[in-house]
Image (spheres, rainbow, N blue to C red):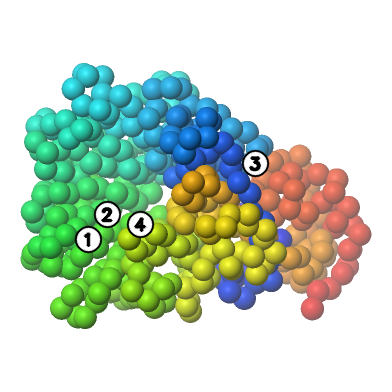
């Protein structure tokens, strides 16, 4: 997909960090959403729970179409909505246990099927749930989450073709599968280690697992997120033997091993929880301490962590939440959208725009010419991600406004 200056991507095949881009940010409450739990990589579809009656407790689930500003209230069987497929057509969450024994089971929604139970593992007790869904693969055909052996937690992988399968139990039980790669082959989460939760990964095909701190899992933490291909993991890491007193926000790759994100937390003594990463390396997450949370961002994946509310306000956003932004759950692949929620304030959306530096230059090659005109005409009347494929005015539609933008700046040369 071709992007140009109204987006964060500034040159063909390369993505420029938010740290160096001239940007503006807008803030939006997603009423009546209580939470925003996941977002598609293109930033169009958002899912979570609603609070229609205003009592700060979830009373339904939703799918929000940001492009058309439309809330779709999901059918009442859905208890929560935790994840969504890349095309917005499949949603993962929970529904009441059809057997009537447990409080709920993991469930999957499509427009054609409504909510359908994913079942539970054979020895699952009612604890009080029998299973819970946490994350989906890109096409929605693979789901991961938590079920039980009695009331000892077990991670599961569910495939549309084969159903639910237990992931290898690790350490002392208490396992949960929290995230999965786009192709469904890499799974991350935690096991109950020597002291508390310890980071763990599994092969989503063979179901074999590994502790990230073998053999006993003395390090505390868990895998909270990953890149689409699963090559980069986002996790919390507390190694008491190394002097840690709280979880450090950390990223891991096979080549580079463990690397602390910024200082590991925004505030000294707080735990750092990285949640999601954009293609340009920008990471969003939050600090926690005794029930308190504070959202942060690391623009471009380099430098210190910055409080998210202060960062947004420094780029023009008016954030009317005195308590601040608590939990950013997801950032779009291009880094333009961030969704999350704040306790007693509900769900919110940040939209990040680059200030155009070269009007009409759809191809971002420094000159407004036939290449730009052809790109606009090739995508004529199409609805696109704002700022891509000829949409020079960032409206989301390629039309006469974009054509006029090119013609008005014909033969213009940008510095």
Q: Which residue is mark 3?
A: 67
Quadrant location of the C terminus? Answer: bottom right
Give the residue at the far right of this rendering.
408
Is 62 rendered above or below residue 19?
A: above
Closest to the observer, 221 or 113: 221
Verify CB contact (< 8 Å) between mark 4 and mark 1. no
Q: Position of residue 175 (x, y in %)?
A: 17, 49
Q: Which residue is mark 4?
A: 291
Residue 188 position in % (x across, y down): 27, 54
Image height check: is 222 above or below 129?
Answer: below
- Give residue 262's position: percent from left, percent from top: 42, 76
The location of residue 88, given as percent across then percent down, is 50, 37
The first of marks 4 and 1 along the sequence is 1
Name which quarter of the figure residue 414 lies in.
Answer: bottom right
Mark 1 residue crowding within 10 angstroms, few (<14) / some (14–19) / many (20+): many
What is the secondary structure assignment of the residue under circle 4? loop
Work out how far the residue at label 3 is from the one at label 2, CA to CA, in angstroms.
Answer: 31 Å
Residue 199 is marked as 1
- Mark toward the start of the polypeptide (2 vs 1): 2
Which residue corresponds to the image point at 16% horizontal and 60% vertical from the top-left? 196
Task: Judge depth for marks 2 and 4 and give the one in front.
Answer: 4
Q: Earlier in the sequence, mark 4 or mark 3?
A: 3
């Amino acid at each position: 997909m071709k992007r140009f200056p109204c987006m964060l991507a500034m040159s063909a095949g390369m993505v420029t960090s938010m740290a160096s881009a001239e940007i503006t940010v807008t803030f939006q409450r997603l009423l009546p959403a209580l939470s925003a739990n996941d977002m598609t990589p293109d930033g169009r579809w958002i899912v979570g729970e609603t609070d229609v009656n205003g009592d700060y407790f979830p009373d339904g689930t939703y799918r929000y179409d940001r492009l058309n500003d439309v809330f779709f209230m999901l059918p009442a069987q859905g208890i929560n909505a935790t994840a969504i497929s890349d095309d917005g057509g499949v949603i993962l969450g929970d529904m009441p246990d059809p057997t009537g024994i447990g409080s709920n089971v993991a469930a999957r929604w499509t427009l054609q099927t409504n909510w359908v139970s994913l079942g539970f593992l054979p020895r699952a007790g009612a604890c009080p749930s029998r299973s819970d869904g946490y994350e989906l693969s890109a096409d929605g055909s693979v789901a991961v989450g938590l079920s039980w052996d009695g009331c000892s937690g077990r991670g599961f992988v569910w495939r549309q073709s084969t159903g639910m399968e237990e992931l290898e139990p690790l350490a002392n039980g208490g396992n949960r599968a929290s995230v999965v790669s786009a192709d469904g082959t890499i799974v991350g989460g935690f096991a109950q280690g020597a002291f508390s939760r310890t980071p763990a990964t599994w092969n989503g095909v063979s179901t074999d697992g590994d502790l990230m701190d073998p053999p006993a899992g003395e390090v505390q933490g868990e895998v909270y997120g990953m890149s689409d291909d699963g090559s980069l993991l986002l996790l919390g890491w507390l190694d008491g033997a190394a002097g840690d007193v709280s979880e450090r926000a950390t990223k891991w790759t096979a080549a580079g091993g463990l690397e602390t994100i910024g200082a590991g937390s925004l505030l000294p003594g707080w735990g750092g929880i990285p949640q999601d990463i954009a293609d340009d390396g920008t990471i969003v997450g939050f600090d926690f301490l005794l029930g308190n949370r504070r959202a942060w961002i690391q623009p471009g994946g380099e430098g210190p962590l910055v409080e998210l509310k202060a960062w947004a306000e420094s780029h023009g956003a008016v954030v009317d939440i005195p308590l601040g932004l608590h939990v950013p759950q997801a950032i779009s692949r291009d880094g333009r959208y961030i969704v999350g929620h704040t306790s007693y304030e509900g769900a919110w959306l940040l939209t990040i725009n680059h200030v155009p530096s070269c009007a009409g230059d759809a191809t971002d090659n420094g000159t407004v010419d036939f290449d730009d005109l052809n790109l606009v005409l090739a995508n004529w009347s199409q609805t696109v991600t704002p700022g891509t494929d000829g949409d020079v005015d960032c409206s989301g539609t390629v039309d006469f406004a974009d054509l006029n933008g090119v013609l008005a700046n014909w033969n213009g040369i940008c510095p």
